[in-house]
Image (cartoon, rainbow, N blue to C red):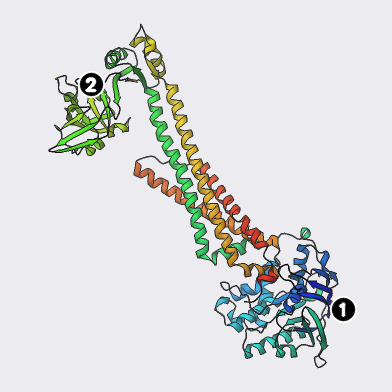
Amino acid sequence: MNVLEATDVHRVYATTDAPALRGVSLKIQRGEFVAIVGPSGAGKSTFLNLLGLLDTPSSGELRINGVETSGLTEGERDRLRSQTFGFVFQDSFVLPEESVARNVALPLRMRGIPQDQQVDLVSSAIDQFGLIRKSSQLAGTLSGGERQRVAFARAVAGKPVILLADEPTGNLDSENTRLVLGHLEMLNASGVTVIVVTHSDEVARVAERVVRVEDGQVVSDQSVASQTPATVVDCGQLAGLDPAPKTPRTRSLRGWHLPEALTSLLLAPVRSFAILVAFVVAISGLVVAANLTATAADQVSETLSAAALDEVVVRLPDAGASLQAAERATELQGVLFASGSAALSESEATLRRYVGDVTMESAVATRIVDDRFLATPEVSVWPEHATALFSASDGSRAAILGPEAATSLGIAPDAIGDEIEIAGQPVTVVGHLTGAERDPTLLTSVLVSQADFVQPANLSWDLTVRTQPGLPARIAEALPLAIDPAHPESAQVRTVADIRTLTKGVNADLALTVLLVSVILLMLVCLTSSISMFLTVISRTREIALRRAVGATRRDIRALFLTEGTLIGLAGSLAGVALGVGATVAISVALGWSPSFDMVGAALAILAGVAAGSLSAVIPSRRAARIEPALALKAV
């Protein structure tokens, strides 16, 4: 029975004018040893690729074990190829970073053969080719002859019906050539149909049949009577598989994608690490941003909520109204104290200090405050008597400096009595702020006493009213009438609702900012990862083609790269979340905040990282799946 039958096969490539094959017809019986010879460019390798289903004819008919291949789907062709053929090429195409055993097991893994069966088949094949002692050695460390023996072991591990060898001795010395010829004869004697493309007369002499190809045509087909016919073994029994192809839909899913993807990543640590770092940076940045947003929002909310519980602010037209309003406000039940303040603009409050002939200027926030302002327990000053000096109405203008304001003017934190100029008015420094719990911005400001400072015209004053906890809403309603019964509308009250609205606005703005930054960051990582994986596809072209040759489908290759991308995204996300949490703690401690952790955000970050990893692999996986094994496996 004919195991291979080609009838009037043509192969034309779009990139060349002349056809590679022109009407080739050939029948090969089971158990034959056939050598295909001819000059370079005659079409020998093209014909071998067509026979092995690595390529498709432009026209004509090709039957394998009685199955006409032109009507098969690509998945059916892949399955038929993996069950029928073993391949040996001029270049051994070993995976250099993997062991000899894993190289030999490659076609078995691609076919989804169970692990326990793989061990037996691989051990038998390695032993058959004298490699048992090197089974755990990296294939990249072997000599050329040893690599070719690995290629033979890989080709026969799955017990193929037909062995296709393309110039298997082309890169070998005479001794290794004799070893290869011995292997070919041994395999043929065991019942394997052997078809070898060669330039070597020595190789052709061991075949029982020599087919000569020239200019894409078979010009001669001679049998060598001296050869002993090999024992014919039924191909179904030999391969241990049903030779009739089945559609991909009837096959169970293969389970090799995950371990193969993981192995590929681990065996290329530099490449994998480079992509991984991009994900770690992106996800950790996302987590830090989300957590610090939550932390900052908590701090803002606590400050504003605290103010909402015991504070009301009233906008008044002038300082005189402020003094009178403060007195009337304190008469209300539930009011603890009230004080007024007004902020000068930078143009109104130019600060100068004269040191000899040097003039120092600083743009520092300046507030005019009344003598009640420093009575709040959240504000502390040094020295203790600074408050009395500050509020004295003796004609001298007094100022208290926040530490940052003092530094900007070159005044030591324990120095008093220095003269500065504010808005053209000389002012004496009588003390320094050492704490401002409720309003940290005071530490960057200069406080000027209302008593003697000449105020600019049209200056608006804020009356801050501190109440017992829970009473600001009720006090806010009563204040306008208490301050100015005749014109209550002149007092603009900032209510509790105003502050809560501000809190929500701050949180919403922070969340939106983080979301936008995170999206941009992930898009950049996705693009970077996709480019890196695309370059990886180019560097792994022959590995991909080899996987296709020994049984992997296009869908398998896509799944392999998508799995690699997903694993990178998952690993980068987990590492990024851990790094982000640690960075959040460190930054919060440095700022004196209580860290807040957005667990939902962390979970979403992991999902986003996995999705980004998978998405970044989509284009590279499609590119990898389109690689044609017949072209990619050509020897250099």
Against 308, residue 99 (above or below) is below
Give percent across and percent down for residue 478: 38, 12
The residue furthest front is 17
- Which residue in the protein does label 2 denote? 450
Q: Are the residues tagged 1 and 2 within 8 Å (C-beta)?
A: no
The residue furthest top is 486
Q: Nearer the viewer, residue 237 or 441?
A: 441
Q: Amino acid at mark 2?
A: Gln
Give percent across and percent down for residue 243: 81, 70
Residue in the picture at 72% in, 77% down = 45
The image quadrant that residue 40 belongs to is bottom right
Label 1 vs 2, first from the N-terminus:
1
Secondary structure at numbered mark 2: loop
Q: Nearer the viewer, residue 275 or 303?
A: 275
The image quadrant that residue 398 belongs to is top left
Q: Residues within 10 Å of mark 2 (few under 14, many from 20)?
A: many
Residue in the picture at 44% in, 23% down = 498
Instruction: Report how far apart the C-alphas of labels 1 and 2 lie in the structure.
Output: 113 Å
Name the mark on residue 1.
1
Against 292, residue 276 (above or below) is below
